Amino acid sequence: MKKIVLLRHGESVWNRENRFTGWTDVDLSEKGVAEAVKAGETLRKEGFHFGRAYTSYLKRAVKTLDVVLDRMDRDWIPVTKTWRLNEKHYGMLQGLNKRDTAEKYGDEQVYVWRRSYDVAPAPLPEDDPRNPRFDPRYAGIPDAALPRTESLKDTVARTMPYWECEILPALARHDELLVVAHGNSLRGIIKNLKGISDEAISEFNLPTAVPYVFEFDEGLGCVKDYFLGDPAEIASLMEAVANQGRRG
Ligand code: DG2
C-alpha cells in the first residue's frame, strides 16, 4: 500500500506564546524539538522508509523535518521545499495573541478568522515590511501569487495544484512520502483528501507533530487514514488547539 504521512511541525515559539503566526518565520520551541524527536522515533518504530519529503519555506517545518529524518537515519533522502506548503497567511493578525484578540473582538469573530473556509483577516498593507514581496525568499514568485492575507480557501488554491502535480505523482516512484507543513496548509489538503465539507472542516484541528498516515490504492485514491498515537491523547491535543482562540 502506498502511503503519505502528513505532519504539522513541532510547537513553535509563537505557538507557545499563542500568537497568530502565518508566514512569520519563527523557530521551534524546546518542546517543539522534543515533539519532532518523538514523531521521528514513532515513524522509525512503525517501520516507515520515506523515499522523498516535502516541506514549506518556514523554519519551524524545515527544522521539524530535519529532526524527524535524523531520528529515522534518513537524512539523505531528497527534500523539496516549496512556498506552496507555507501556512495560511494570517494578514494583519500575524503577531497578535489569539486569546487577547478574542477578548477584544469576541470568540465568534476569532473563530471566523481561524476556522471559516472563505473569510480572510484584513490584509497587510503594501508598504508593511512583513509583506512577502519584500522577502528575498519569494523573489522568484510572481507578485500576484504572493498573499497579503488568506482564507483557508485561498490557501487550498495554492497548495492543491502542488499536491496534485508534484506530491501525488511521486507515489509512482516511491512507496512512502512525508509532508511536513502547518496546521492550516495541511487542513486544506486533508479537507480535499477526505472530501470534508466547507462547514465541517471548521471543526477539525491538527495537533503539532502527530503523524497522520494516508493510504492510497493503485489508482492513487485515498482508502484509509489514521493518526499514530493514543487516540484519547490526540483528541485532547486537538481540543487544546481549538481552545487557543477562546477567551480564558
Ligand atoms: C498557526 C495555526 O500555524 O494557527 O499560523 O498561528 O501550524 O504554522 O503553527 P502553524 C498560526 P491556528 O489557525 O490554529 O490559530
Image (tube, grey):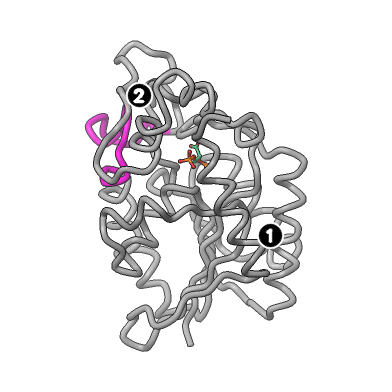
The one of 139 and 4 positioned closer to us in this rendering: 4
In the image, 196 versus 246, the foreground residue is 246
Q: Position of residue 245 (x, y in %)?
A: 49, 35
37 w.r.t. 41: above or below: above
Residue type pointed to by label 1: Val
* Position of residue 67 in the picture relative to residue 107 (left or right): right
Residue 9: image location, x then y, percent: 59, 50
**Residue matched to label 1:** 68
Q: Residue at x 37, y 33 (%)?
A: 108
Disc number for residue 80: none
The location of residue 199, given as percent across then percent down, is 28, 54
Position of residue 59 measured from the top left corner of the image (x, y, whole percent): 59, 40
Task: Say which residue appears at 65% left-offset and 51% top-offset.
Answer: 64
| Amino acid carrying mark 2 in the image | Arg
Q: Which residue is mark 2?
A: 133
Whether the magenta-drawn stretch holds residue 119 is answered as no
Question: What residue is at 34 percent from the left and 80 percent from the top?
Answer: 220
